[in-house]
Amino acid sequence: MNVNAHIHTPYSFSAFDSIAQVLDAAVAEGIGVVGINDFDTTDGFAEWDEGCRARRLYPLFNIEMRGLDEELQRAGVRVNDPANPGRVYLSGKGLAFPARTSETWESRMVAVRAESVMRIRAMCEKLNGLMAGVDIPALDFDEIVRTLTLGLPGERHLAKALRLAVYKEGNLLRAQALLEKLFGGKTLSSSLDDVAGVENEIRAALLKAGGAAFVAETPAAFLPVEMVVLMIEEAGGIPTYPFLADDAEGRFTEFEADLPEAADALRAMGIHSVEFITARNSAAFLEHYAGWLWDEGFAVTFGSEHNTPAREPLVLTTRGGEPLTPRLKELNYLGACVVAGHQALYAHHAERYHPEFRDHYAALGHKVIKHCTDG
């Protein structure tokens, strides 16, 4: 069975316009298990659950969060953020739905989201200063939030809003000239009808570090890694580490370069589950890393993210668009079964994930997935 366990939706940012569009695409592509995996929010869970039930898809309820390890930051060790030492992306797999979180959990999430919104608002103000210099009407931040988001704005929403503003008059040559002025004279690489490419260039040129509208994140935007792990567990989820793994040049971050050392470090953090965004890596590499980690007792899941403007297939591929090998498909399904089994047990007993029972979760998960998808 095809599985995609990591999909962002418009509740954070997505290549898709709606959850219905995501799930219709999953059905069309023959995917049976789908995992919502938005940043810092579970607001899409109810719609995801309802949509999956209507289509006989098995839903995984996940979240993505960012933590900070100050010791690794001081040491200059990059973990799974290739540009920022000490920053750690973590997913929570198989969160409880309906939610069972405390007021403390909710207040921490509200604070993290509020910090993010303040930063994006400040970046919008900087963008407006740049746009005034090239005679483009200012962006209305509240209107961006209302029309382009489901409540949680990010850099990609600003990039989309700016593209829409410069395209508004329908004169693409003028739009190109305006963008190149904003880019300080740098030539636009993407064709103007490649809206995903144009938005990616806007973000890279203006909104990332070194860009004229960039605003650095404050320490308040990050929770300690150990707190993120505990929050995921409190929400009923399995703390999961997303591996960057090998890039196109075969390079690794300092944290991931030695696989056994990375595995030991993850266990010390209380993390016994990992995931890979498969298009980043070669099939041979994925078979080695994912297979070794599974054999070491980790749960392993795969996903596509779809958190950029580019509309790609949901069926997973490895680097270069190569299909998953039979072994990778097997691992992907087994990992989804682990999460599904945990979800089912947590719904009845509210017990945290126990890695020593991973294979029992997988066996149960296979049954609940088959029951859901076979009707």
Image (spheres, rainbow, N blue to C red):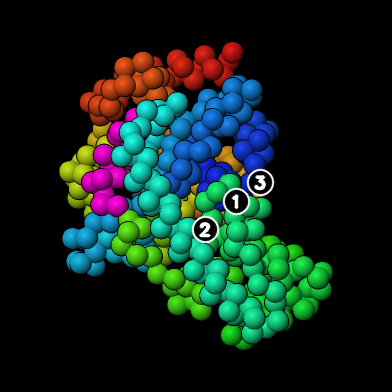
Lower sequence index among marks 1 and 2:
1
- Nearer to us of marks 3 and 2 is 2
Can you give x and y, in whole percent of width and height, for residue 239 in the image?
31, 39
Whether pointer 1 and pointer 2 mark residues with C-beta atoms closer than 8 Å, the reply is yes
Left or right: residue 143 compared with residue 168 = left
Judged from the image, the secondary structure of the residue bearing numbered disc 1 is loop
Can you give x and y, in whole percent of width and height, for residue 236 in the image?
34, 30
Tell me if mark 3 has few (under 14), some (14-19) or many (20+) residues whose alpha carbon lies within 10 angstroms of its own: some
Lower sequence index among marks 3 and 2:
3
**Magenta-tinted stretch:** 223-240
Hey, what amino acid is under mark 1? Thr
Hey, what amino acid is under mark 2? Gly
Q: In whole angstroms, how far apart are the C-alphas of marks 1 and 2?
A: 9 Å
Which residue sits furthest right?
Answer: 170
Lower sequence index among marks 1 and 3:
3
Can you give x and y, in whole percent of width and height, for residue 343 in the image?
40, 24
Residue where numbered disc 2 is placed: 154
| Disc sitting over residue 17 in the figure | 3
Q: Is residue 291 visible?
A: no
**In which quarter of the view is residue 131 placed?**
bottom right
Does the magenta run of residues contain 233?
A: yes
- Write the residue at 49% across / 68% down: 122
- Write the residue at 54% across / 72% down: 125
Residue where numbered disc 1 is placed: 149
From the viewer's perspective, is residue 210 above or below residue 154? below
